[in-house]
Image (tube, rainbow, N blue to C red):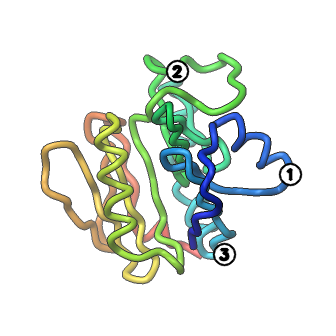
Amino acid sequence: MTTATGTNLLTADDLLRLDSRGVRGELIRGVLYETMPAGHEHGEIVMNLGAQLWNYIKPRRLGRLTGSDAGVWLERDPDTVREPDVAFFSAEKMPPGMRMTGYSETVPDLVVEIVSPGDNRREVRDKAWMWLSHGVRLVWVVNPATRTVDEYRPDLAVSTVLEDGFLDGADVLPGFSCSVSAVFAI
C-alpha cells in the first residue's frame, strides 16, 4: 500500500534522512509515498527470484543485484526515487566491486516488481511503463494472486508467463532461465 504524505516537495537527500528515522517510501516528483511491509509471501518471492538471479549473475560477474532498500534516483528537480523489489545493473553500467553509497543514479537493466496485496493493477502497470520510459530494458511484474509474471520490454507487447512457463533473460541476461513455479516455491 502506498500513501502520499505532505505537500512540500522533498529531495532524495531528504528521503535518505527520513529512512534513517524509520520512514520508508519512494519519492515521485518530490512527493513522499510511504510504503508498508508487503508481507511474508512477498518477501519469499523476492528471495526466490533474487537467489535465482544471484546464482546466475555473481559467478559470471555480469553485474550487480539489489533489493528494494537500495533505491534508484530517476529524476531531479523535483526528485524521483523508486525502489524496485529487485534490480539488476549490468557490469558495463555498474562494475562489480565498486562501492556505492546513497541511491543509484544508474538505471537498471532489469527490474522486478512484485504485486503487493494493496496494489491496484493500473498502478503496477504504470510503474512498469515508467521503468521502461527511463531506459530499463526488461521488467518482470510478479503477481502472486494469479501465479503469473508479466514481461515488459521496450517496443513489444506485454506477455504473460504462466506458472508452468519459464522466465528468460533475453538480451539483458543471455542464457538465464528460471521456472515461474520456482519463483512461487514455498
Residue 85 sits in which quadrant? Answer: bottom right
Disc on the earlier residue, 3 or 1: 1
Mark 3 lies on a secondary structure that is: loop
Q: Secondary structure at mark 1?
A: loop
> In terms of depth relative to the viewer, which is nearer, 138 or 126?
126
Q: Quadrant of residue 131?
A: top left
Residue farthest to the bottom?
145
Judged by depth in the image, the label closer to the viewer, 2 or 1, is 1
Tell me the kind of residue under disc 2: Met
Q: Is residue 166 visible?
A: yes
Which of the two residues, 177 or 90, is positioned nearer the viewer here?
A: 90
Name the residue beneath numbered marker 1.
21
Residue type pointed to by label 3: Gly
Whole-percent x and y of residue 59? 56, 30
- Where is residue 73? Give x, y as percent: 53, 35
Q: What's the distance in space between the residues labelled 3 and 1, CA to CA?
A: 21 Å
Q: Is residue 130 above or below residue 147?
A: above
Three-letter amino acid code of the residue under disc 1? Arg
Q: Using residue 10 as the reference point, say whether residue 110 is left or right of it.
A: left
- Secondary-structure class at tag 2: loop
**Nearer to the camera, 136 or 34:** 34
Q: Residue at x 42, y 71 (%)?
A: 181
Q: Quadrant of the C terminus?
A: bottom right
Query: Residue at 69% of width from left, 44% of height from top?
Result: 15
Q: Which residue is mark 3?
A: 39
Tell me the crowding category of disc 1: few under 14, some 14 to 19, or many 20 or more residues within 10 angstroms, Cα based. Answer: few
How much space separates mark 2 and mark 3, taking CA atoms? 30 Å
Look at 44% across and 35% down and name the residue there.
108
Residue 94: give its label.
2
Could you say where residue 51 lies in the image, as x and y percent from the top left? 58, 51
